[in-house]
Amino acid sequence: MAVTLKINGASQTVPAEPDTPLLYVLRNDLELNGAKFGCGLAQCGACTVLVDGKAVRSCVTDIGSLAGAEITTLEGLGTADKPHALQSAFIGEQAAQCGYCINGMIMSAKALLDRNPRPSESDVRQALAANLCRCGTHNRIIRAVLRAANEMGRT
Amino acid sequence: MTISINRRAFAKGFGGIVLAFTLDPALAQQQKQLPGSLNGNRLLDAWIRINSDGSATVFTGKVELGQGIVTALAQIAAEELDLPLARVRIVSGDTGRTPNEGQTAGSQSIENSGTALRLAAAEVRAILLGLAAAKLEAAADTLTVADGVINAPTGKTIGYGELSAAADLHREATATVRPKLAGQHKIVGQPIARFDIPGKVTGKASYVQDLRLPGMVHGRVVRPPRYGSTLEAVDEAKARAIPGVIAVVRDGSFLGVVAEREEQAVKARVALAESAKWRLGPELPDPANIFAHLKSLPTKVEVIGVKQAPLLAGAPKVLEATYTRPYMAHASIGPSAAVAEFKDDKLTVWTHSQGVFPLRAEISKTMKLPPASVRCIHTEGSGCYGHNGADDVALDAALLARAVPGKPVRLPWMRDDEFAWEPYGPAMSMQAKASLDGEGRIVDWNYEVWSNSHSTRPESTTGANVLAAWYLAEPGKMGPPTSPPQPAGGGDRNSIPLYDFPNQRVVHHFIQDMPIRVSALRTLGAYANVFAAESFMDELALAAGADPVAFRLAHMKDPRARAVIEKVAQLAGWKAGEKGDGTRGRGIGFAKYKNLACYVAVVAEVEIDRKEGNVCVCRAWCATDAGLVINPDGLIGQIEGGIIQSASWTLHEEVKFSTQGILSRDWSNYPILTMPEAPQIAISLINRPTERSLGAGEGSQGPTVAAIANAFVNATGKRIRDLPFHPERVKAALA
């Protein structure tokens, strides 16, 4: 069985069953590290990707449901050499300790900024309410998202 | 950077730069005690090698757990070597390459590895200067160093790289070359950005979960319903029939599966779990009576802190209170994971263990392999906060890899593997009793703590200390748990007050029987002991009619402790005798972590939703003294992270169980603090460049829980003595 997906703008065919969670395909077949396995239950947000601009939990999203959808991962935002404003802001604020949750924080923040380019601090906190961080980096993460919004608003 | 070597005024007996690194024959006869981790790893080239391109490779046995230690250690080495950070490469935690520094735990990496690297780097620099003096035909004390290039007054220069071949670093460190004075630091003390963050925010392979080796296959394990269960039967054929399954691995009651694709391994795990028949192990204690049950178990009683003075005559006011904390989980966001490869009778394990050498010892013992045939290489995982499933999953992966030789196996635990099987932070009970004299001073302090072991890590006891070992056909058995001795302590960590009481008695009731698996969780017993002792200080202050800040200062002589208490009061705008308004209030907590490490004082502000029973820790202020600060931004991150993690523990966290087994198996039954709940935090660092650096990774958790508990009383007039402060408990307290 093979399924074709559109990921970070490119069409990709993977040898997986339609009921395979997108997360495993991203990590194993496409060797994209951004999305992380945290719970497999859509509770923690570490696996978040964008599907047609919406933040989605890739651990519970079967690839069979994604025909024609535009999937964006952390790697689709920018690279270490050419980072997205959100990635730059997370580096600037040193907004990671272990960093395992950060993919989900950035992808959920991307969905937020796409629908609300000038969020308040409270908007940011609410948008990230279902993304768990265990190291206690919460405030730096919030600052990084607000910083990115400012940077993006300026250009 | 250019620093004259004149700064190196050598210790007495070592009169010049060349002599400074000559081994004193008298010292060579007897092994002298070397500072920090140098003592156990005495060769200079175990720590530092100079490469022909002029860069340095620095080796440390400590590992990155998300605390930024690799960056901080590189800062220390670069500083003493006079090399730019970009030319220092760190190799950490590899049984094949690095020094053995035991566990990366207890906020000791800067103190132990940092001290070793500082002294080794200073000595290596002196050796290079000695060689350069001869080559440049200049007096050693006229040489200067800039970015790894040594300059003579004649204008002649030579780089570290050109001296690398001649520099014999395969020699014992003497620790006699004095490191730089704080005033000379250019890299130490700077908020250097962490090396690992750009990769982590852009999806570069950063974690063991991201490791992909050629021909790699995927593993999963199946654990029993509860501790001590025995696998009686399982339909292996059904699992083998699932497409992609390569092997079903069964050894006694250890059960796992290996498949070509990850989702196939997950499906096979489900199939195995459904068909497995287990003979159940012993029931767990009744959670309703857990503290009484723990106290009923045999204990080793140790009286650890006694001060005796004549008791005052008259009738002092006597207060007594009992506090508890529940079992708490590490609850890493990413379940523990490992990659293992068994090839040509050699086993390689990529692991996020906090101690690759102790782990290697356990794996080698359990799998009956010579230690030389096992290599454990640290590769980052999700943050661990102590002894989580990291070591256990490494043995699991190794057992699976042995069944499929030549194929590397990647094994990430599933969410319930981690929650149900990790060793929790132990439940604890604390009892305090004290007397006040007529002046409102504490004249007698009695404190007792009941706790299981806080470390059942690999190699911390005799026997086998990794999960799967207990379930094999030839099972290993854990030896009797131990407790780290005072002054650091385990369950009794921070149980001896730093305050100056004329009379005190502190008793540690160490419970060896372990009805629920426990081990090291960040701060060990300090979180609970500081909660109890600092809550009790506030109870006494109230009884004495004193302001909590003034009351603490009145009983504290240590000037550095006084300084953080005074600083946080100033930062928070604390007003003597300030009172809450029924829903809002503030409180203070203080501790010197382990009574040996950093000083931290926290003021917390809470808001209470009296109807719903929800507590918001809305703001916190903190003052910290960690001696010489290596990286202020890193230190602030650790202290702030500790405050937020402690707020989470305090408000939400409790491992749920019944007599039938562990009930906390995912985030719905082990909730943690969410983004909207995170307090606003202001932190003030008191930098003391002339004092040694003090561990700070676990400094703020104890003071924070106490500040929250005291703020709750300040707000409502009611005290909660049992953790966590969940809504039912809050509503009951306010009813």
Image: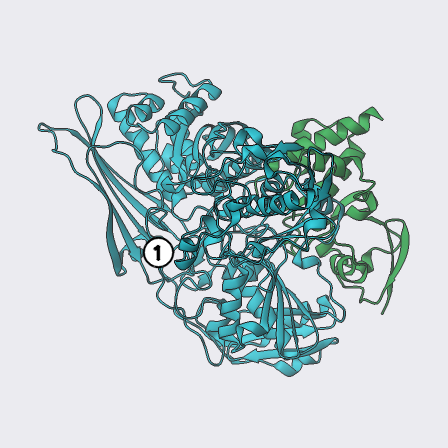
Q: Is residue A73 left or right of residue B556?
A: right
Task: Please identify the residue farthest to the left as the structure is shown.
Answer: B313
Percent coordinates x, y for residue B227 in the rendering: 45, 67
- At mark 1, the secondary structure is loop
Which chain hosts label 1? B
Q: Is residue B160 above or below residue B685?
A: below
Q: Is residue B632 above or below residue B358?
A: above
Quarter of the C terminus of chain A within the rendering: top right
Q: Nearer the viewer, residue B48 or B717?
A: B48
Nearer to the camera, A30 or B325:
A30
Farthest residue to the bottom: give it.
B237
In this view, B388 is above or below B189: below
Q: In the image, what residue occupies the spot 55% across and 69% down? A: B395
Is residue B263 shown above or below B89?
below
Residue A11: percent from left, percent from top:
91, 56
Mark 1 = which residue? Answer: B483
The N terminus of chain A sits in image quarter: bottom right
What residue sits 40% from the left and 49% below the top? B326
In the displayed structure image, the side of residue B500 where residue B137 appears, left or right: right
* Residue B138, image x, y percentages: 65, 39
The residue lying furthest to the front in this view is B137
Name the amino acid type tagged 1: Ser
Regarding residue B299, the answer to whether it shows in the image is yes
Viewed as shown, does residue B102 lie left or right of B81? left
For mark 1, does the 10 Å Cα neighbourhood hold few (<14), some (14 to 19), or many (20 or more) residues? Answer: many
**Drawing shade for chain B:** cyan
Chain A image colour:
green
Could you say where residue B10 lies in the image, as x and y percent from the top left? 48, 38
